[in-house]
Image (cartoon, helix red, strand yellow):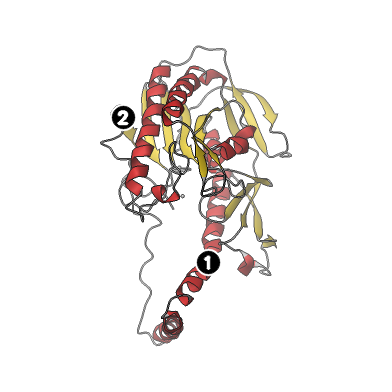
Amino acid sequence: MLNRRSALLSAVFLIAGTAGAAVVAARGNAREPKAAVRVLVYHDMEGLAGQDDWKTYLFSHPEKYPEGQKLLAADLNAVIDGLFAGGATQVDVVDAHGSGNPEPDVRRDLLDQRAKQVFRDKAFDPYVDLTAPNTYDAVVAVAMHAKTGSRGFASHTITLGMDVLLNGKSITESEIVAYSWGRVGVPLVFVSGDDRLQNDLEVMPWLEYVVTKKATSSSTVELRNVDSVHAEMKEKAARAVRNLAKAKVMKVAEPLEAGLHAVPPATLASLEGIPGIKYANETVTFTAPNYRAAYDGVLALVRAARAGYSGVLAETVRKLPEGKQIMANYSDSLFMRWMDYESGRWKPPAPPPLSNKTFHGDR
């Protein structure tokens, strides 16, 4: 549950370990940097400094979520301060987190007033719908998390139980951002999150990375001193802007192989045996003509894999004192819905939009 700047490209080379997959192009250094340096800041909430409780990034936990909002603003402000100190002339902030809050996760009254929040009059996906050429010169990502299987704090990709594959390689949401902006020649230059995400992003050695905490499991961490983390954020964000000419752009050869590997509580097992589906061991892969088509295809698979969540719901209900009766009522409701539709007594309502939010496009 996410811009970029056009630049002259040179020195193209393959990322090791992904045969023919991901390509990095170095930005040319021959000319002087442009006077305007426009930076887009993505933020998530799982990789916050000072955070050791997963409930702080969920709106459904009002006893903890406001604390997470304060931690988020503090991290963002440290990075924003550093970006301006390094020479940024414009800093915009876009919400790439899906807390469930109908309002922005970052409170405007707590956010550095020099930064603008990205709003649209229609729902949008921040990872792929903002990538217009010549709108930003660099992108940074704050409070990010490791990918599924990395054993980081709240590690996942897009949502619970999903592992996104690009040309056979498992990738993080930070890489999704980098590849997306790579389409218009804009680099990801700064990321913050736990130590496991730092390991995941070794494929981007030019990044200025700040470790906010050490993950000891998906729900526990060893915290760093928050003031020290914020000082490092400011320093490295400033350096990222000053060294922008040395940054690299992530690109991927097209057409490409994309896919989704599901782990509990998600599952893709229901797709096994369908003609035309490349399925093996909870993994579905497909060929896409370009990056956007690959991304959209992965999201479609995510929606299919989320059907596995219902198993957890059924387990939870059955444990209730009245669980047996609730499940019986559910079964009867299924039959009644079928009979009502077949009899013309019920028609499905229009599907709701994927998001009704205008400040970000969380899924």
Instruction: Note whether 322 is above or below 108 in the view shown.
Output: below
Circle 1 SS class? helix
Instruction: Note whether 133 is above or below 163 in the view shown.
Output: above
Residue at 37% across, 62% down: 352
Q: Which tag is nearer the camera, tag 1 or tag 2?
A: 2
Query: Badges 1 and 2: C-beta atoms under 8 Å apart?
Result: no
Q: Nearer the viewer, residue 99 or 61?
A: 61
Mark 1 neighbour class, 10 Å CA radius: few under 14, some 14 to 19, many 20 or more = some
* Rendered location of residue 113, percent (x, y): 28, 29
Mark 2 neighbour class, 10 Å CA radius: few under 14, some 14 to 19, many 20 or more = some
184 lies left or right of 37: right
Residue at 48% across, 69% down: 313
- The amino acid sitting under disc 2 is Asp
* Rendered location of residue 260, percent (x, y): 61, 54
- Residue 225 appears in which quarter of the rendering? top left
From where the camera sits, is residue 11 visible? yes
Residue at 48% across, 17% down: 242
**Label ID, residue 251:** none
**Label ID, residue 112:** 2
Q: Earlier in the sequence, mark 1 or mark 2?
A: 2
For mark 1, what is the residue?
A: 307
Q: CA distance from mark 1 to mark 2?
A: 40 Å
Instruction: Note whether 134 is above or below 32 in the view shown.
Output: below
* Residue that extends furthest to the left in the rendered view of this protein: 109
